[in-house]
Amino acid sequence: MTQTHYTLADLGWSAEFLAQLTPEEVGAVTPARVAAVHRDRLSVLTETGPRLLSLPPNSSTGDFAVGDWVLADPETDRVTRLLDRKSRIFRRAAGEASREQLIVANVDTVFITTSCTAEFNEARLERYLALAHAGGIPPVLVLTKADTCENPDDYRDRLRAIAPAVPAITLNAKDPDAVQALRDWCGPGQTVAFLGMSGVGKSTLASALTGLDLDTGSVREDDMKGRHTTTARELHALPAGGWLIDTPGMRELRLSDMAEGIDEAFAEITDLIGACRFTNCSHEAEPGCAVQAAIAAGRIDPARLSRWQKLKREDAWNSASQAELRKMARATGRLHKSAKRQKIDRNRD
């Protein structure tokens, strides 16, 4: 791909972004799409070609994601402001701080990629689905390495069991024609991204879509271990138009502020909650629980209920503000001290 100049429409610009500009900004600033995020600079694409932008005061590269739209001062090559995103993929950052870590922005479709191997894991896929739904991005499930097992339909059935309404594609990522199955979601002005564990074929598919030799590495088939196949996020042009963002494999995927996305990923459960007799139903042993009735009738897998409840608890905890976390920690400490004093008093008696 040798093209370096694109129209704004080619880059994914739309009326939704144009509407965010003030009359003073129109014609005075340069709209630019973030192609890569560096330590203290942003690589961007504009109508006049690629550029390297410096950051505005009091900001860091952590405030930006590949796929973002920014406005730049054409004289200083400095970002003046970040435009509101139409979609994003994010997770809770590592550490104790309740902070959002951006992964990609302004994506139209996310290909959640897994494989017909021991890597396949329903609970992890449900996390990816919640991530996509929470960010406002329609997901497509891509099942790779169909040539490595006797019956790939078994894996496809497991996908249908957790996401019957989500399109699912089974393919061999090494087949040169495999990417044709993904073309329906790619096209001029469209941006797609891959999510999934390392070694499932994301970079192989990304290379086939873009025509580039993207970095891939070997992964042992027996335990799925090996070096990460992608080490950075970058915006890549597709030959037929549109853009692709490949992402590193993510083993740790902590959810935060994703209550609605989790509920959408478990729609067969959340659609029944309003039919429970009690509004505060925990869906365990209460009489008149519509969810438990569906489980008894075989319409809902009890394991799905358990995983939904686990994700809801995790999200509620991670979504708590720092003040709330400190408050809970102090309360836990007080309870611990009180229990310790009571134990000492009992021993004295």
Image (cartoon, rainbow, N blue to C red):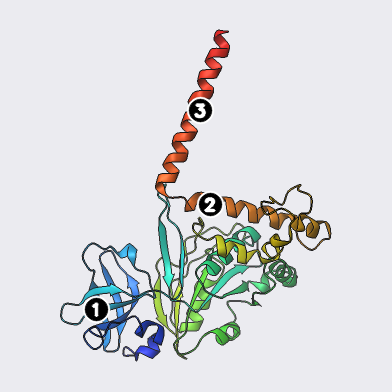
- Residue shown at 53% from the left, 52% from the top: 316
Q: Which numbered disc, 3 or 1, marks the residue that appears first in the sequence?
A: 1
Query: Is 259 on the left-hand or right-hand side of 28?
Result: right
As helix, strand or loop, the secondary structure at mark 3 comes to helix
Q: Position of residue 25 (x, y in %)?
A: 24, 83
Task: Check disc 3: other Cα within 10 Å, few if <14, some if 14-19, many if 20+.
Answer: few
Amino acid tagged 3: His
The residue wearing badge 3 is 336
Q: Residue furthest right?
A: 297
Q: Is residue 324 left or right of residue 267?
A: left
SS at mark 1 in the image: strand
**Disc ID at residue 72:** 1
Q: Which quarter of the picture shows residue 15?
A: bottom left
The span from disc 2 to disc 1 (Cα, nearest Å) is 37 Å
Sort mark 1 into few (<14), some (14-19) or many (20+) by Cα contacts within 10 Å.
Answer: many
Image quarter in which the N terminus is found: bottom left
Residue 323 image point, x, y percent:
40, 45
Q: Is residue 233 visible?
A: yes
Which residue ends up furthest to the front in the rendered image?
278
Q: For the residue carrying disc 2, how many other residues have a C-alpha within 10 Å: few (<14), some (14-19), or many (20+)? A: some
Residue 5 or residue 2, whichever sits in front: 5
> Mark 3 and mark 2 in contact (Cβ < 8 Å)?
no
Q: Single out the mark in the foreground, 2 or 1.
A: 2
The front one of 52 and 296 is: 296
* x then y, percent, for residue 87: 46, 73
Three-letter code, disc 1: Ala
Q: Are marks 3 and 1 in contact (CB under 8 Å)?
A: no
| Percent x, y of residue 161 | 72, 67
